[in-house]
Image: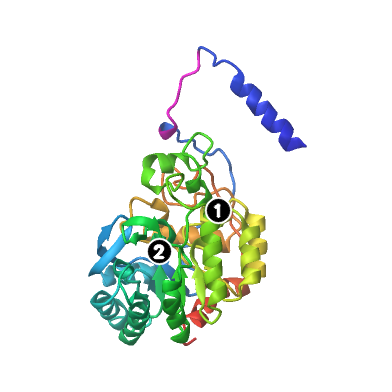
């Protein structure tokens, strides 16, 4: 009842005319400084060694309408610079998900994984540019095998599938996430024990109009191309349910549903998915904004699924478009603080304005037993790493 009374009070105050003395303030200029006095813990190093299962140390050079193409790769930061940060933060290993395909993934495996054993693992990616060619299903499965032979440890599927990839690659109808042409690819990953890190859809707010009721208004207003509202985009739930059908259809393949299964806003839904789909796992990359604004629900979620949640950040070296993902010491300190402490009301990203919604987060204060699982044990098991 209290909630109803509150919203009525807000409507009434909105209707009141603005007093002459008040000054309009552009939302971009609003930088409120918190007057709250609460403990602030700096966690300079993770309490236990960490495997970051969600990073982007390399990218395809060519990307057309959201579809990465070709075999040419680029790396925004050299391995020695990345390793220096890792050593200071107690990061044992980073998984470079966007390792590319063909000759590209061979080069990334050599440059990162083979040159620095135990410190980096590289995943491969699908050849979407050939998805409309005859024989693609078999070709793609064979490519997984070749990438595995070259050393790739898993497959990454970005949100291209479901939101960008079309019948004629960049034109025509959007392909369905559970399109049967990909079935041999999912099966090959299962047979080769390569986990699939999969990002389907995006935050709930990105599927709603970019208006004053949207909790991610500033972000969508600055990046209109991040909105999947309208046009021919499927509803978010249709995308997630198609993803779940893929999980159910390939029970021997292990899937890491990135970004808290891309539904950190609704842990009840993620819970239902995890209960129904034993081959589904999650990681927490770029979703501290969601988990940390519901710390009690999140804590229960970590208790219940402590064997299926992994540490991930979605870190991108020099990724200035997304401050919540910029690889570096400040980013990791926020993740460690969120997981290890009970600090309250702190920033979830190293940025002057909270980039994924204007709110702050509270820590979970996980016990050591769960911390070890989330920091490295669950990932080590899934990635077949020696303890
Ligand atoms: Zn990512």
Sooner in the amino-acid sequence: mark 1 or mark 2: 2
Mark 1: secondary structure: helix
Write down the residue under mark 1: 290
Tell me which image quadrant ligand 1 sits in.
bottom left
Residue 138 screen position, x and y as percent: 36, 80
Q: Residue furthest front?
A: 134
In the picture provided, is 145 more to the left or to the right than 245? left
Quick check: is the Cβ at mark 2 less than 8 Å away from ligand 1?
yes
Residue 301 screen position, x and y as percent: 64, 64
Q: Is residue 297 visible?
A: yes
| Residue at horizontal 51 percent and vertical 46 percent from the top | 205
Determine which quarter of the picture holds residue 36. top right
From this view, report whether residue 264 is shown above or below residue 210: below
| Residue at horizontal 62 percent and vertical 52 percent from the top | 294
Write down the residue under mark 2: 158
Q: Nearer the viewer, residue 196 or 17?
A: 196
Determine which quarter of the picture holds residue 270. bottom right
Q: Nearer the viewer, residue 33 or 97?
A: 97
Q: Which residues are magenta?
A: 21-28
| Residue count near mark 1 (Cα–Cα under 10 Å), binned few <14, some 14–19, many ≥20 | many
In the picture provided, is 107 more to the left or to the right than 314? left
| Residue at horizontal 45 percent and vertical 76 percent from the top | 183
Q: Nearer the viewer, residue 247 or 152?
A: 247
In the picture provided, is 9 more to the left or to the right than 346? right
Residue 112 screen position, x and y as percent: 29, 76
From this view, report whether residue 81 is shown above or below residue 383: above
Q: Are marks 1 and 2 in contact (CB under 8 Å)?
A: no
């Amino acid at each position: 009842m209290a909630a109803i009374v509150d919203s009525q009070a807000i409507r009434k105050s909105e209707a009141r005319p603005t007093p002459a003395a008040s000054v309009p303030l552009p939302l971009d200029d609003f930088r409120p400084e918190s007057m709250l006095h609460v403990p602030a813990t700096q966690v300079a190093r993770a309490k236990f060694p960490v495997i970051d299962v969600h990073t982007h140390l390399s990218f395809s050079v060519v990307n057309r309408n959201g579809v990465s193409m070709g075999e040419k790769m680029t790396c925004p930061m050299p391995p020695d610079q990345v390793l220096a940060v890792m050593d200071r933060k107690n990061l044992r290993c980073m998984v470079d998900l966007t390792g590319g395909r063909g000759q590209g993934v061979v080069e990334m495996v050599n440059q990162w994984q083979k040159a620095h054993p135990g410190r980096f693992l590289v995943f491969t990616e699908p050849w979407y540019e050939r998805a409309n060619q005859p024989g693609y299903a078999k070709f793609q499965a064979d490519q997984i095998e070749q990438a595995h032979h070259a050393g790739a440890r898993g497959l990454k599927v970005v949100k291209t599938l479901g939101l960008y990839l079309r019948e004629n690659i960049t034109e025509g109808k959007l392909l369905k996430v559970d399109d049967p042409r990909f079935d041999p690819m999912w099966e090959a990953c299962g047979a080769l024990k390569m986990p699939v890190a999969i990002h389907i859809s995006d935050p709930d707010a990105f599927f709603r109009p970019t208006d004053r009721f949207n909790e991610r208004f500033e972000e969508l207003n600055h990046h209109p191309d991040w909105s999947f509202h309208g046009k021919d985009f499927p509803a978010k739930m249709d995308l997630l349910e198609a993803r779940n059908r893929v999980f159910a259809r390939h029970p021997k393949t292990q899937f890491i549903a990135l970004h808290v299964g891309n539904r950190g806003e609704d842990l009840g839904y993620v819970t239902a998915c995890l209960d129904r789909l034993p081959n589904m796992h999650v990681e927490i990359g770029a979703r501290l904004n969601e988990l940390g604004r519901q710390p009690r629900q999140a804590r229960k979620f970590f208790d219940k699924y402590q064997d299926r949640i992994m540490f991930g950040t979605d870190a991108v070296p020099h990724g200035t478009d997304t401050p919540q993902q910029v690889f570096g010491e400040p980013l990791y300190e926020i993740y460690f603080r969120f997981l290890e402490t009970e600090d309250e009301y702190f920033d979830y990203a190293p940025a002057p304005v909270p980039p994924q919604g204007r709110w702050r987060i509270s820590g979970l204060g996980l016990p050591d037993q769960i911390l070890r699982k989330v920091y490295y044990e669950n990932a080590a098991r899934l990635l077949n790493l020696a303890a």
